[in-house]
């Protein structure tokens, strides 16, 4: 079936639905929702059997929904309507939430229902619930609705508020006044619920050190306390600790209103000039700290019959890895290598494994070109340390999505296992034709062949975990449930640690590295990649800087990239 996606952006949910539907043989083309006339033009060109709107920020025009079946994905339970569905659900402490696929009609979100799914609500950031529970439920619901549409004869169920099973209601856009934290009254749990409901957009409007800002990325703290509610009482790496009436919460990120470049940044970077009198609360070592606290890098070990496995977690916000974060992670990795283990599992974070260099900290730097250079070198150093490891078998366990250089950092490990449902974007071109580094020219071709590597880099399309295994980029696609995935990873890693042939495997790995080095030294791959990157960062063509600016500022789209809008390809004609 020809399916047109009308969407605000090619975000993670849209990418997932795109991958699932194309895998099932549908022909999917994408048009960004820019103007009514643009949508009408896309329909005239593509002649879709069905229109799906995975992520829209405004109503579908009447000229479109009157003539075509348009299925809207709404991140709310049946009957829920309005633009702040998840925000209200999280802030209000809903225990169960859901996704509804409904047909577009005159009244927004009130059309008949094609499919609906529910899920238990997790206490987590809105962005995390969206990328996990909402995405999974939306995938099930859309696949069901598309199947019903394809079979024909399905009659969607009108929304009926008289039905006792309909729990949702129409709710307005949530305002900052309703998100506001009352530091003199709100408990830590209430503060965290408000921060979670507003993450990653738009954040909670507040003040820090007397200056207006938006707060993001809240974390619980069990032990540290003191000071007046609302006061900043400590800092650690990128986060600030603020007192509440019953304890304290960490604020990981902030957007400072008066800053020269108003960007969401690590909180200690956004307010770097205000930390002089604030005590640092460092964690000693890399092992998992006791109780709840904010810890972006943590190491734990498990042992079966004396065969120990080290797990290195790095939960960086949005999977972005700044120069310092790469350096700290490398220090933690070297430390992990010195432990009495033979296997290290690189766990990344629960939402993202890595999205490569940190584009926001680069944008905020005095010289973005210099900071890009420092950051790419730091991530390359880390990748190199992993590639050169001959003491351990290394495994990258992708619990969450991975983008650009993050994918090749994962591929630097001997084995890459992904959770089913994870999406990879192992290409760089979307960021202003960036050439990319992280030793991708060494790591990718042996896995997927020279032509396969070329296709992945040029096509710029997402890869599912199953697709990644089929292409040879990944070694295994494991269960989709996040906790079951972690258990399975630990079990498989323990089996590898106990395997009789582990030393032979390590020897073979070391031999292969030596042979590779003799054929072409790693330093040469790096120098070649970085010569391109130097041109990207410092050269005449500013494409990377322009693309990065629009990415971090979230500039609205003014056109749909041609690799997504196949109906706009030269030579496109509707297949017979
Ligand atoms: N640096 C800083 N922030 C990043 C980032 C990076 N490398 N990658 C993603 N983010 C942020 C986004 O700005 C967004 O921020 P928000 O919390 O303010 O909304 C958040 O992560 C989620 O990103 P989004 O694009 O909405 O997620 P997605 O899952 O739909 O898309 C990617 C994932 C990886 C395709 C997309 O984020 C991307 O292209 N990232 C850039 C990758 C890159 O070019 N890295 C540099 C080269 S190594």
Image: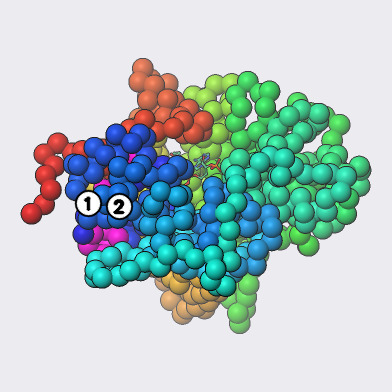
> In the image, is residue 459 part of the stretch drawn in magenta?
no
Rendered residue at 44%/25% (across/down): 545
Rendered residue at 35%/20% (across/down): 541
CA gap between label 2 and label 1 equals: 7 Å
Rendered residue at 49%/65% (across/down): 160
Residue 42 horizontal/vertical position (percent)? 24, 41
265 up-or-down from 244: above or below = above
Dividing the picture into quadrants, the one containing residue 239 is top right
456 up-or-down from 497: above or below = above
Dividing the picture into quadrants, the one containing residue 167 is bottom right
Question: Element type at marker 2?
Answer: strand
- Which residue has dot 2 on it? 51
Q: Which mark is residue 48?
A: 1
Dividing the picture into quadrants, the one containing residue 30 is top left
Residue 303 horizontal/vertical position (percent)? 62, 75
Q: Is residue 211 left or right of residue 26?
A: right
Q: Which quadrant of the rendered structure holds the C terminus?
A: bottom left
Q: Are marks 2 and 1 in contact (CB under 8 Å)?
A: yes
Residue 342 horizontal/vertical position (percent)? 54, 67
Residue 153 horizontal/vertical position (percent)? 26, 70
Mark 1 nearby-residue class (10 Å; few <14, some 14–19, many ≥20): many
Q: Which residues are magenta?
A: 21-32
280 up-or-down from 98: above or below = above
In the image, farthest residue toward the front: 162
């Amino acid at each position: 079936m020809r399916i047109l996606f009308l969407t605000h952006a090619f975000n993670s949910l849209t990418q997932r639905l795109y991958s699932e539907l194309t895998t099932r043989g549908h022909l999917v083309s994408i048009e960004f929702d820019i103007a009514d006339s643009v949508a009408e033009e896309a329909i005239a060109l593509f002649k879709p059997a069905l229109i799906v709107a995975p992520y829209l920020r405004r109503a579908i025009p009447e000229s479109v929904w009157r003539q075509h079946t348009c299925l809207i994905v709404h991140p709310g339970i049946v009957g829920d309507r309005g633009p702040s569905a998840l925000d209200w659900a999280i802030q209000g402490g809903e225990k169960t939430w859901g996704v509804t696929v409904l047909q577009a009609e005159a009244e927004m979100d009130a059309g008949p229902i094609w499919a609906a799914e529910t899920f238990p609500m997790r206490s987590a950031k809105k962005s995390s619930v969206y990328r996990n529970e909402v995405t999974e439920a939306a995938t099930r619901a859309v696949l069901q609705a598309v199947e019903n549409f394809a079979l024909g004869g399905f009659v969607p169920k009108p929304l009926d508020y008289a039905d006792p099973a309909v729990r949702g209601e129409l709710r307005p856009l949530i305002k900052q006044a309703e998100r506001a934290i009352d530091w003199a009254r709100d408990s830590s749990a209430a503060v965290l619920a408000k921060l979670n409901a507003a993450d990653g957009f738009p954040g909670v409007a507040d003040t820090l050190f007397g200056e207006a800002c938006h707060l993001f990325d809240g974390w619980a703290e069990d032990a540290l306390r003191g000071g007046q509610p609302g006061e900043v009482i400590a800092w650690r790496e990128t986060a600030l600790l603020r007192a509440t009436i019953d304890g304290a919460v960490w604020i990981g990120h902030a957007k400072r209103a008066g800053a020269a470049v108003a960007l969401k940044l690590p909180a200690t970077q956004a307010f770097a000039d205000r930390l002089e009198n604030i005590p640092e609360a460092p964690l000693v070592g890399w092992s998992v700290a006791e109780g709840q606290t904010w810890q972006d890098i943590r190491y734990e070990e498990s042992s079966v019959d004396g065969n120990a496995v080290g797990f290195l977690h790095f939960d960086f916000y949005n999977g972005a890895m700044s120069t310092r974060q790469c350096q700290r992670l490398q220090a933690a990795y070297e430390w992990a290598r010195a432990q009495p283990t033979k296997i290290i599992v690189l766990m990344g974070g629960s939402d993202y494994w890595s999205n490569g260099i940190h584009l926001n900290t680069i944008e905020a730097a005095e010289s973005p070109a210099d900071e890009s250079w420092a950051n790419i070198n730091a991530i390359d150093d880390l990748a190199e340390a992993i590639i050169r490891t001959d003491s351990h078998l290394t495994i990258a366990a992708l619990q969450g999505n991975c983008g650009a250089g993050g994918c090749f950092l994962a591929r630097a490990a001997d084995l890459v296992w992904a959770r089913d449902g994870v999406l990879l974007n192992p290409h760089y071109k979307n960021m202003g034709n960036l050439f990319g580094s992280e030793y991708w020219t060494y790591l990718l071709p042996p896995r997927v062949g020279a032509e396969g590597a070329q296709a992945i880099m040029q096509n710029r399309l997402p890869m599912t975990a199953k697709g990644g295994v089929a292409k040879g980029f990944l070694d295994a696609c494991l269960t989709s449930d996040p906790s079951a995935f972690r258990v399975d990873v630990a079990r498989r890693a323990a089996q590898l640690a106990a395997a009789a042939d582990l030393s032979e495997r390590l020897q073979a790995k070391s031999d292969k590295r030596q042979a590779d080095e003799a054929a072409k030294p790693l330093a040469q791959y790096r120098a070649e990649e970085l010569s391109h990157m130097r041109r990207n960062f410092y050269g005449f063509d500013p494409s990377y800087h322009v693309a990065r600016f629009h990415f971090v500022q979230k500039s609205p789209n003014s056109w749909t990239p041609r690799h997504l809008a196949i109906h706009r390809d030269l030579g496109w004609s509707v297949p017979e």
